[in-house]
Amino acid sequence: MSNFASNLKFLRKRKKRLTQQQFADLMSIKRSSVGAYEENRAEPNYELLKKMAHFFEITMDELAHDKINEKWKPVTKSSGSNIRVLSLTVNNDNQENIELVPVKASAGYLNGYADPEFVSELPKFSLPMFRQGTYRAFELKGDSMLPLQPGTIVISEYVENWHDVKPGETYVVISKNEGIVYKRIAHRFREDKGFKLVSDNKTYDPYYVASNDVLEVWKAKAFISTHFPDPTSEPTLENLTNMMAQMQKQVDSLKN
């Protein structure tokens, strides 16, 4: 939302010369959140953006993207329903942090992913090789993406346009029904079907996540793990399990 911060500040002052505290009271939020929005340190979630736009009697798209000043006039009446809001934090040098979403916070993330107050409370770190772009780290659970072990932290880059997703590569997909999952995406995004997600552990079947169920998509860029690979070339238990599962599927197919 390139112009949201300046637009909010301009509209707030023009609307009965409201102070940040007065506007915060009207929106049922903290004054510090208004300050963060106007200083471009955070962005509101979808429902709050919708409430602000309604208060100023403009569309969400206009509030987020138009350059609003004394000469500006509204020219569109779009609903802005396709806008996705991303909250983030910055360090003392005004550089974006990498926020970590641990397993214990994964359930809360579904409700607070666009809430600047929730995101600000997540653990944060930075890495010198990830300075350009917006990154977030997610702790894995389950064994669907072996050989990456449960507890592995996947560092991912935010994907704004889902049509940029590359088939065959791994992503962290946030959805209402499935929660936070790290999967391989089988094909490009389709408006009618959404994404087809595939596990590297072949004992898990592929499945679809509908487009209206998806909240965020993050491209996997690196991972941090305390599990070191086994130096032996002998088959691992996981590999043998996968092989047996594949053989069982082939046998069942032949029977049918």
Image (tube, helix red, strand yellow):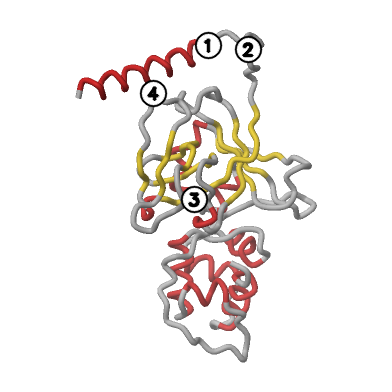
Proximity of marks 2 and 3: CB atoms separated by less than 8 Å: no
Residues under numbered marks 4 and 1 in contact, where contact means CB atoms less than 8 Å apart: no
Q: Considering the numbered disc 2 on the image, is that residue within a helix, a strand or a loop?
A: loop
- Residue at the front extreme of this rendering: 254
**Does dot 3 land on a helix, a strand or a loop?**
strand
Residue 30 in percent (x, y) is at 55, 59
Say which label, 2 or 3, has the lower sequence index: 3
Which residue lies at the image location 37% right of the left edge and 51% below the top edge? 213
Tag 1 residue: 236
Distance between mark 2 and mark 3 Cα atoms: 34 Å
| Cα gap from disc 4 to disc 1, whole angstroms | 15 Å
N-term-proximal mark, 4 vs 1:
4
Query: Which numbered mark, 4 or 3, is in the foreground of this view?
Result: 4
Between 220 and 89, the residue placed more toward the observer is 220
**As rendered, which of 5 and 144 lies closer to the eye?**
144
The single residue placed furthest to the left in the displayed view is 256
**Label 2 neighbour load within 10 Å: few <14, some 14-19, many 20+:** few
Q: Earlier in the sequence, mark 4 or mark 3?
A: 4
Q: For the residues marked 1 and 3, what is the alpha-carbon distance in whole angstroms?
A: 34 Å
Marks 2 and 4, Cα distance to the nearest angstrom? 21 Å
Pointer 1 with pointer 2, Cβ within 8 A = yes
Crowd class of label 1 (few under 14; some 14 to 19; many from 20; radius 10 Å): few
Residue beneath label 2, please? 230
Give whichever of discs 1 and 3 has the lower sequence position. 3
Mark 2 and mark 4 lie on one chain; the one further toward the N terminus is 4
Residue 17 position (above or below residue 105): below
Instruction: Please determine whether, in this image, residue 149 is positioned above or below residue 173.
Output: above
**Quadrant occupied by the N terminus:** bottom right
**Quick check: 187 left or right of 14?**
left
